[in-house]
Amino acid sequence: MIGEVTITNDGLAALATSLQNGAQIKPLRFGFSNQILSGDIAAYKVSDVNCWIQGSIKAVNKISNDIVEFVCDVAPNEAVDYARTAVIYLDDESLFVIAQPPYAMPPSARQIIKIQIAYTNIESLTDFVFIETDITEYKSKFEKWDFIGIKPW
């Protein structure tokens, strides 16, 4: 099943800035929320989403030549609420992506949400640099970002 993924206005601004000056964007953390978001999702700010947990992105996987996947994982002993919304934060604490799975994930289950984003010409996008803290950096030369989906695991 596929849910909805939205790159926020702040995320798009970070991508545009990165395109202009060759700076890196760094998706570092995720958060899970029980909120059901509506309206102009792209306009949401960090303060608009109340996450009951935040953590480091567990993995960043290159799925194909044009798809990257962010793995967000919360163990059952850490889950205190339903996961209806997942967000990804950049290193500057701005909201990069908002994802809403097709159904709420209960706290009694392992909550793993894989957020996939597609873009053209991955080879010109970046080199994946894995750092000891499991942080993946993107040296961006973005041409295009598109919505692919979100997969609960």
Image (cartoon, rainbow, N blue to C red):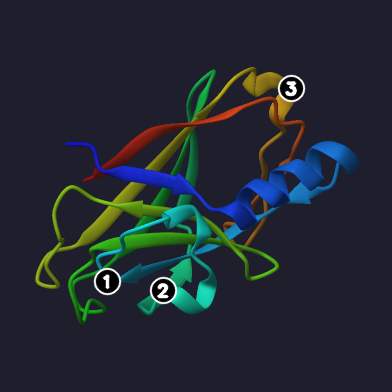
Of badges 3 and 1, the one in the foreground is 1
Characterize the local packing of mark 3: few (<14), some (14-19) or many (20 or more) Cα atoms within 10 angstroms. Answer: few
Left-right relation of 35 to 87: left
Amino acid at pointer 2:
Val
Do tag 2 and tag 1 residues touch (Cβ < 8 Å)?
A: yes
Pinpoint residue 29: horizontal percent, then vertical percent.
52, 65
Q: Secondary structure at mark 3?
A: helix
Residue assigned mark 3: 124
Q: Nearer the viewer, residue 37 or 80?
A: 37
Mark 2–mark 1 distance (CA, rounded to whole Å):
7 Å
Q: Secondary structure at mark 1?
A: loop
Residue assigned mark 2: 49
Q: Is residue 146 above or below residue 23?
A: above
Mark 2–mark 3 distance (CA, rounded to whole Å):
33 Å
Nearer-N-terminus badge (3/1)? 1
Residue at 26 percent of width and 79 percent of height = 78
Q: Nearer the viewer, residue 137 or 50?
A: 50
Left-right relation of 124 to 90: right
Q: Quadrant of residue 127?
A: top right
Residue at 67 percent of width and 65 percent of height = 91
Q: Secondary structure at mark 2?
A: loop
Mark 3–mark 1 distance (CA, rounded to whole Å):
36 Å
Q: Quadrant of the N terminus?
A: top left
Q: Is residue 125 above or below residue 90?
A: above
Amino acid at pointer 1:
Gln
Amino acid at pointer 3:
Ser
Q: Nearer the viewer, residue 48 or 96?
A: 48
Characterize the local packing of mark 1: few (<14), some (14-19) or many (20 or more) Cα atoms within 10 angstroms. Answer: some
Residue assigned mark 1: 35
